[in-house]
Structures are given as C-alpha cells and as structure tokens.
Amino acid sequence: MDLLTAHRAATRQFDNRLRVIRDAQWDNATPCTDWDVRQLVAHVVEGQRQAVALLTGEPPVAVGADLLPDWESAAAAAADAWNAPGALDRTVALPVGPMPAAAYLERRVVELTVHAWDLARAIGDDDDVPNDLAAVALEIVQRREDELTASGRFGTSMLTVMCADDLTELLARLGRARWKSFTPTTLVR
C-alpha cells in the first residue's frame, strides 16, 4: 500500500469511528490519558488542518465547537492537499525544522491510524484496523521509532516480546497495550 492510499485508509478508519460517537460519549476517557473523546477528535481535526496549511501555505483554520463538520471539511481539504501534483516532493516547515512532505505524511498515517484505534477504544467500538494499514503504520514506526517517540506524541514503547499481529505490535511500540482491558470507566487520569 502506498502512502496516499494508507492516508485515505487511515482517514476512513477515523471517520468511521467518529460517525458513531453518541452524545453521551464525548467526555469519555481515551487511551491518550490527557484527552477525552472531544479533545482527541479536536486534535485530529487540527492535525488535518495543519497538514493543509503546511502543504498549501494557507493559514490553518481554527477548530470550532461542532467537530463532525470540522472533521469533514478538514479531511476533505487534507485529501486534496496531499493529492495535489508534487505534494509529496515538497518540504514542509515544522516547528522542529524542515521535513520532506513524504516523511510528514508517514507521521500523519501513523497518527490517524493510532488515533482511530484510540477513538474506537474510548467509545467501545470495534478497534480492529485492517492489517494492510496496520502493516504500513508498523513499518513506518519501526523505521522512525526513535523520532516518533521523541516527539512526545506517543507513549514509551511497551514492546518486550514479538507480538502476535501488526496492530498489537504497532500499539505496543507507541505505548499502548491492546491486550490490556480498557473501558472509558477504567482509565485513571
């Protein structure tokens, strides 16, 4: 699976979970211990909008209070920006310094994939991720694990043995334990 296809698949995974959030679930805890569902979704919307700003040079649009329409517009704009001719050949200016757009897209694929899982866990939805997407995200993490964990966006690796499947290994490498029981009421902040 190429990076653009992986980005579309990861976006779809997040979108599928977002569309089934019930009103009472927006304050649920997530595996991202500092965020509830609303904060997690706002973070992902902001990430999509940041990607658009970095690729187009336009200022980012602020995240509003109505997260589903914000997500829809941000996801569509990000897809357009990533699929624009030459987008992957650009360099983007991140706070940590310039980065090839393709490397930044790898980060976005990992973040969308993992946060789709986080959201599923927080709302009690199916937390499986298609193995081809999990395999792409895992390969990226294996190559860039030090950089990704140093970014502070993910937890410390919990990988101690070979995992049974790509998703479990991906989650373990990024400080999440698929095999641990998590429900919105069991998380202690």
Image (cartoon, helix red, strand yellow):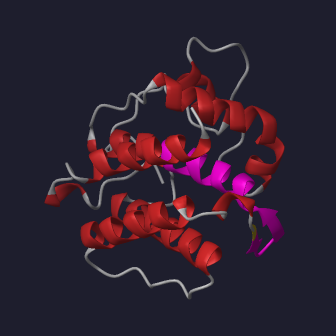
Whole-percent x and y of residue 100?
Answer: 78, 60
User: Is residue 22 toward the left or the right of residue 177 in the image?
Assistant: left
Quarter of the image for the N terminus: give it. Answer: top right
Residue at the image point whose x is 51% and y is 25% from the top: 132
- Lateral position of residue 20 relative to residue 104, left or right: left
In the depicted structure, whether residue 164 falls above or below residue 185:
above
Q: Nearer the viewer, residue 123 or 60?
A: 60
- Viewer-proximal residue among 30 and 165: 165
Pinpoint residue 33: horizontal percent, then vertical percent. Answer: 51, 53
Give above or below for 164 relative to 181. Answer: above
Q: Which of 163 and 105 lies nearest the eye of the viewer? A: 105
> Is residue 9 inside the magenta stretch?
no
Residues drawn in magenta: 92-114
Residue 144 sits in which quadrant? top right
Rendered residue at 77%/40% (across/down)? 145
Would residue 146 be visible to someone looking at this image?
A: yes
